[in-house]
Image (tube, grey):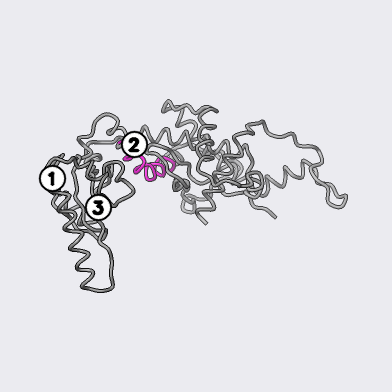
Amino acid sequence: MKRTLILLAAVIMISAVSAFAAAPTIPNIVATINGEKITKQELIDTTVAWDASTVLERLIMYKIVAQEAKKAGITVTDKDVQAKFAEFKKNLPPGQDFKEMLKRSGMTVDAAYAYMKMTLQAEGVVRKQIKVTPADLEGFNRASHILIRVATSADPKEQAKNDADAKTKIESIAAEIKAGMTFEDAAKKYSEDPMNKDKGGDLDYFAKGQMLPEFEKGLEGLKPGDISAPVKTSYGYHLIKFVGNGKDSKGADRKKLTDMVTEKQMGTKWQEFMLSARNKAKVVNFLDPAPKASATPKPVAPKPAPKPAGTVKPGATNAPPPPPPAPTN
């Protein structure tokens, strides 16, 4: 269900890319059923009666976010919105019937555009509020590794031999490195981790606690450039080279890591911003006056959606799911 909502949101946004037009002209007769007419006024009256409160609350929230963005110096242009739509398009599977899915969603192009603009405004404000500290960066390490896997066997004696062979191989690799081969060249030549062997075993930055406990323990006491003794995990035997801690990162690495920390905090900060902005705004809703204070429901802030299918680079933003479609008969 969640995956469907994400896909639907992306489809809505893609469809909007080529259709940033003004609201359509509504004819006086919007439909006929066996000769019976439905007029424009009947459509308007019914829309207001069925969904005015929902749309108004959404519009109020969009206005609040726009005001907060203006105060924070955040400007979102048509070009920015179109770029975000294009980003979603790259992550969708091919062969989708965009127009049909947009129609089934119950959302219009104008609604999708307004929603995305609000999303970018809110993200801009939240990013300015997030202050990444050295303590935040300290929660990340960077390392490279060489992995030699242990072949599995149902025969205990054969399994013990496989384990011993893998350990002997990792020890021989360690000896070659000690004799002068670089860790990176050894990883490219011997490592059995296809995800990073061509990068010299580079695992990039990872949060403390993200790796297996045995792997994390192998990092203990290492200084930048140090190589661990062989470490055994459920994946096999590793040699680990400690590259450094996040607090010591510099230049492009520091920016990338800062973006990673920012993305990690975005979910919580987004909700805090949306709730805070709504609660402090002086809103007078004449269409749907608030009931007594004791019965007033708390506004619900939209949550950021999981990243769309495909790789998203650190720092890339992801819109929360769209508002629910209007009820239909």
Taking depth in this image into account, of 169 and 22 the one nearest to the observer is: 169
Instruction: Check disc 1 and report the residue beneath it.
Output: 222
Instruction: Check disc 2 and report the residue beneath it.
Output: 259
Report the magenta stretch's main SS. helix
Instruction: Check disc 3 and report the residue beneath it.
Output: 147
- Seen in the picture, residue 103 relative to 258 is either above or below; the reply is below
Is residue 148 shown left or right of residue 88? left
Q: CA distance from mark 2 to mark 1?
A: 26 Å
User: Three-letter amino acid code at disc 3?
Assistant: Leu
Q: At 62% from the left edge and 33% from the top edge, which residue is drawn? A: 18
Q: In x, y percent, where is residue 31?
A: 80, 45
Q: CA distance from mark 1 to mark 3?
A: 18 Å
Q: Residues within 10 Å of mark 1 (few under 14, many from 20)?
A: some
Residue 302 shows in this picture: no
Q: What span is colored magenta in the figure?
A: 258-275
Instruction: Name which of mark 1 and mark 3 comes first in the sequence.
Output: 3
Residue 4 shows in this picture: yes
